[in-house]
Every structure is written in structure tokens, then in C-alpha cells.
Amino acid sequence: MKRFIIAVSILAVLAIGVGYAAWFRGFYLDLDPDAPITAVFRTEGKDLLRQTGTEEWETFTIRGVDLSSNLPGHPVLEFAPEPEDYLRWLEAIAELGANTVRVYTVMDADFYEALYTYNTTHDQSLYLLQGLQVSDTANYGSEDVYGEGFLDLLLENGRTAVDVIHGSRIITLGNTSGTGRYRWDVSPWVIGYLVGHEWDGGNIAYTNQSTTHPTSYTGTYFTTSPDATRFEVVMARVMDQITAYETSKYKVQRLIGFVNDASNDPFDYQELYDARFLKYSQTDAEHVLTTDALLSGYFAAYRLSSFSQDYIQYLTDAQTAALGDLLRDLDTTDLYHGYLDLLSRYHTMPVVAAGYGFSTARVPTFEGEGPLNEREQGEALVQVWQDADRVGWAGVFVSTWQDVWDRRTWNTSYATYAFRDPIWQDVQTDGQCYGLMEFWLGGEERVCTVDGDPSEWTAEDVVLETGQGALSMKYDEKYLYLYAWGESFDPETDALSIPLDTLPALGSTYCENYGLTFERPCDFVVRIDGRRNSRVVVQERYEILWAMHAFEVAREDAYDELRAPDSPLFQPISVMVQRAEPVPVDVWLPAVTYETGALRYGNADPEAANYDSLADYCFTENGVELRLPWQLLNFASPADRAIHDDYYVNYGVEAVSIDELYAGLALEGEAEGRIRMAPFALEGWGESGSYSERLKESYYILQAAWAPLEK
């Protein structure tokens, strides 16, 4: 009996060990090494092909959407969506006319369950391009790609992803991935893998300059050409080992590629251009070669973003000569100025847009662009897809499916709390508004719709009454809403001013710009003056652009001669944007700025025929409704009632909490004496469990172009 117990115990331990090795570490024994290898997708020239029968193949053009796990109130790596959320989104993506979704990393198990459920309950398949990525710490860190947390993790994530899509993995703690028991075999609907999401050009250059790393790679499925860089060698190794793992373990191969972008493209530019667009390196998919053992195929992938429309004139003479006829008759009138056509001509393999999009935020990031409303966003998405299709690209992925509240953008990132981003949306930040779908906190009924209909405003919203009018206010996680009216006020011909006092330590009781005096020192003045001349101005001591970028915009030191805390001058509110063209060496030009305080007239009701998602204000019969983004008013986190403190006391942006702000109202012809101010309480909010979602106008514009096509 004792021997029996020992034997059973040993077998149990072995079973647990084997189970752990198989489900947690990917261990396997290849019991049939001579089994035939299959591939449902493959490449042929510059086309992707899908198998439709035993010996039948058809051209497959990707119409894809990037999907993430972002939800309001939750960081992206929390993977908060439930299976029913993912399923609802997948159904809407399919109804859009898309045939593929892309995820940046291994998602949580709920996503793959939803993908399995969708494809087993619908006639038309929705395919997946599985992304692989490293952490931002590794990508933007001080080490190159051979450093800790990069190459080894990328290889491990690749093997994990292979097991995940085959429903044969358990992840208990993910570095850049989701967790769960992955038991849903979605491999029939996975077209392939994309290595990387956004490579740091500095990391690539650092790797390429190393003298200790390999300069070539020879694998079973991928090798490198003599011209390959050290980074390209790493990409060949990663793709080879991922393909080898799936081929050996599951006897199947898939398409694979690695991501690239304009900052790391194969072309050699003049130093002036490189310096302007931070182009430190060249990465060329053509330097990675395939062997006859690869049955599926290899494709080039590019993230598309803004760059100089005159990029061709900045190519080096040697590069221009090398491209030769590829530059002849290049149509540079499209949105990307012929860049898509040039890449298509250059590559001998299929080319895919691994993410392109346009933001509906109020603030652009690039000179001469945007901002775009939802209609313009949709039109731009369609135009780029049409351009890519016309020049022979194998497909595109629109980025992204949903707005992402915790993204940060360089020209606004210093203004808000990074750790509180997921619980409010900063519509000033470009990166947060790329989605085809928007969110808001709470139920389906919005706090306010700026449409010129004041019926939603109640007596409880009134903050201040004057002799001839009143000011009402309320707020949500995106905007501070105001409704001002006067009995004899004509919004088409009369002007009104709304002074705001947010920071007690600063402000002026006099606004020299408009000849107004206030009973409290004010930090902002909202000036409504017709449909084309309305704006928010800020007391100059509280102007963040000057405090943070005085040297860039005026070549002055903001901290040399301080602006007075009670200065009566109010300045336009502007932000920096990227200059479109390089600046010659030894030449100083003021930074390009965009006046984000300028207000846009229009109807912000999504149900209206004249809907404009960028509308800031709309006239009523004798008043005006308006909405002001929190960050425009120097809020670091409205959820915490946190606003910027005096920049010149803290030498930059530090926040303080307030319990209330003060607002006043001056109708034209009534502003006699000091304008009375009244308090408006701020309560903030914590993490919310309820939210609503809405498909943007851009979704339906893209759907009109995609839905009629074969999937």
C-alpha cells in the first residue's frame, strides 16, 4: 500500500509538472516531425492570398481596425472589458465592413473567447492580426534591443502568442499582456503576427551602432542580406523563431512582419531633415530574406503619421539616384504626398498600413493640419484607404476602434496628471481622440448637449442672476458647460463676457483687453462676440505656453522678468505644434503655435443634420450655450479638482486642489462697475463603473465605403 501511495504521488507530481510546463511554459514534444505543414494565408508577389479550397487561393485585401482593451476609468493593461463588450465591438467592426482586427499585444482571455464566439456564430469570418510588443521602459530605455526586457521578452511573447491563439496557454502575470486561461482555439481566424507596435528610433540607432552584436542571421525560415543592420538581424531572428515554434508544435505557418514608420523608413535623407524629424536610422524590410521553407509569407508594415510634404526634395543625392525611376511621375497630391506610392514601388513584398488615423481632438499636433471633426475624420480615413488601395497596398488598419483616455501627446502632456488620465477625457489631447467610437461616463443621457436648445437647463443650474439675465453651469468628465442669456441680448450682434476665477493666488480685477472690471481677481475671460470672433483669454501670468515655452516662441526666459500676478493683460491661449518644414542650420524661427482658445461655433448634437463634433458654442434665441475643455482652463485633473498653481513659484506645473471656482456675466451694455461673481462648487469624481459609448460620424462614413465590398 505504501508503494502504491508513493507511486501515485510521483505520478501526480509528474502530471502537475508536465501540465505546468505545457500550459504555463509552452513545453511540447514533437511526436510527428514529418507531418505536413499547412498555411491558410500566403503571399505572392505584392499580394496576400487566402486559401478557399484544397488548391484554390484568392487575393485577400485587409480592411482592418486596431482594437485595444481601453475603457473609461481603467488603465489599458487592466484589460477591463468583459467578453460581451469585446463581442459587441467585434460585431460593430464587422458591420463596418472590416474583415480583420489587430491587437498590439496578447489580450486577456476574454477577448479570444469573444473572437471565437463571433466566428462560430457568423457566416463571415473576422480575422485577427496578432501583435507583439515590448514595454515602453524597454523600448525607450537606456539599453539597446539586446538589453533586459527587450529581445528575450519579445521571443517569449511570440511563443506565448502562438500558444494563446491555439487555446493552449495559461498566463497568471503578464508583463505587457493580458492574463487568464486561454482555451479558445482561434487559430483558424488568425492571419499572422506583427512584431512591434512603435519602435524608438534612438533605440534602433543605438543597436545599429553597437560593435558587439551580430551583423547577420541565418535561420530556417529567415535570413539577412549583406546590407542588413543589427536591428534588422534581430527582426529576422524573432520572426524566424516564432515561425519555427508554431511550425514544429502546430504544423502550421502564418504571415509575419515587423512594424516600421516614416521615422525609420528605408530612405536616406539630408541631415537637416533627419534633425527636424528625429530620424536616426533606416530600417528596410527588404534586408530580411525568406527561405523556401517559409510557406506562408512575409510582409512590410508601416505606421502612417504626419511628416514633411516636401520629403522628396530632402532625399540625399545618392538616395535619389538609387531610387531612380521609382520617383518618376509620382503623384504627390494625396494626403501622404505620394509616400504610399513610393513605398509600394520600392518594396517587392506586400505592404500593409499597420495603423493610420486622424484625431477629433480640439488641438492638432502638426502645422497646417486639423483639427478635424468627426465628418472630416471619416473622409480622411476613406481617402487614405483609397490611395493605398490605388497604389497596390495589401491592406490597411484604421487606428483606433475606441478613444483612448490614457494616451498622452507631447504638446499637452505636461499639463495634466498622467496617473489620473483614465477617469476623464482631455479633448485637448490629440492622442485621446483617434477612435471610431467615443465614451462618456454615466448613462445614455449626457450632462449637456450644446445645440442651442436651452430646455435641458433647470433652475438648479443657475449660478448667477443679473438684472437682465442669468448664468447657469454644470460639468462632466470632458467639459465645463455654461449657459448665459439676457432678456434683450441678441447673440448675433451683441457680445458678452464670462470672467472665471479658478486660482485664488493669481488673477486681475481688470481686463484691459475688453475694458472690464471684476469684483474678484479673474484668471480667464470667455468672450462671445459673434460666430467668428469668440475666444477664451488667460491672464498673462497664468499663460502656460509662456511659462513652459517662452524661449521656443519668443527666445526669452519666462523666469527672468516675471509677469505680474495681477497683470491686467489677458493673452490668447495657444499650444505648440510641430513645424512642417526643417529650419536651416544657425537660423532661429519662433515655434509654430495654434490658438486653442479660439472658440468654434456650431451644433454639437450628434443627432442634428448640421452636427459638428468640434463645436464649442451655439446660440439660443437670446443667449449662448458653450462647453469649455477642462485643460483649456489649466485643470490638471478635474476629477480631483486639481488646477495648475502659480508656475513661477513652482518653476513649472504643479497642481493644487480647489473646491469651487467663481464666474460672472457681463452682457453688452450692462457691464457698469465691477462685474459680480458667484461661486460654483466642484465635487470631482472617482473611478466610475458606468459608461456609455457612441459610434462617431466617421464610423458611418467609413462604413459607406467598406460595407459594400466583399470580405
Image: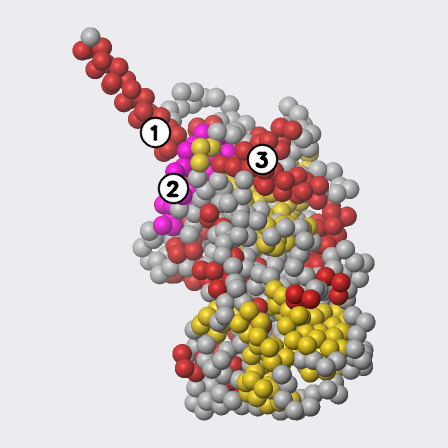
Q: Write down the residue under mark 1.
A: 20
Crowding at mark 3 (Cα within 10 Å: few <14, some 14-19, many 20+)? many
- Residue type at mark 1 is Tyr
Secondary structure beneath label 1: helix
Quarter of the view holding residue 375: bottom right
Earlier sequence position, callout 1 versus callout 3: 1
Q: Residue at x 70, y 80 (%)?
A: 466
Q: Which mark is residue 173?
A: 2
- Residue 692 percent location from the top left of the image: 63, 50
Residue 195 as seen in the image, left or right of residue 439: left
Residue 76 as seen in the image, left or right of residue 349: left
- Residue 608 percent location from the top left of the image: 79, 58
- Residue type at mark 2 is Leu
For marks 1 and 3, give the CA distance: 26 Å
Q: Which mark is residue 269?
A: none
Q: Is there CB contact under 8 Å for labels 3 and 2? A: no
Question: Which of these two is toward me, 351 or 348?
Answer: 351
Q: Residue at x 46, y 76 (%)?
A: 645
Q: Which mark is residue 115?
A: 3
Crowding at mark 1 (Cα within 10 Å: few <14, some 14-19, many 20+)? some
Vertical position of residue 136 compared to residue 194: above or below: below
Q: Which residues are magenta?
A: 149-174
Q: Is there CB contact under 8 Å for labels 2 and 1? A: no
Earlier sequence position, callout 2 versus callout 1: 1
Q: Residue at x 50, y 45 (%)?
A: 80
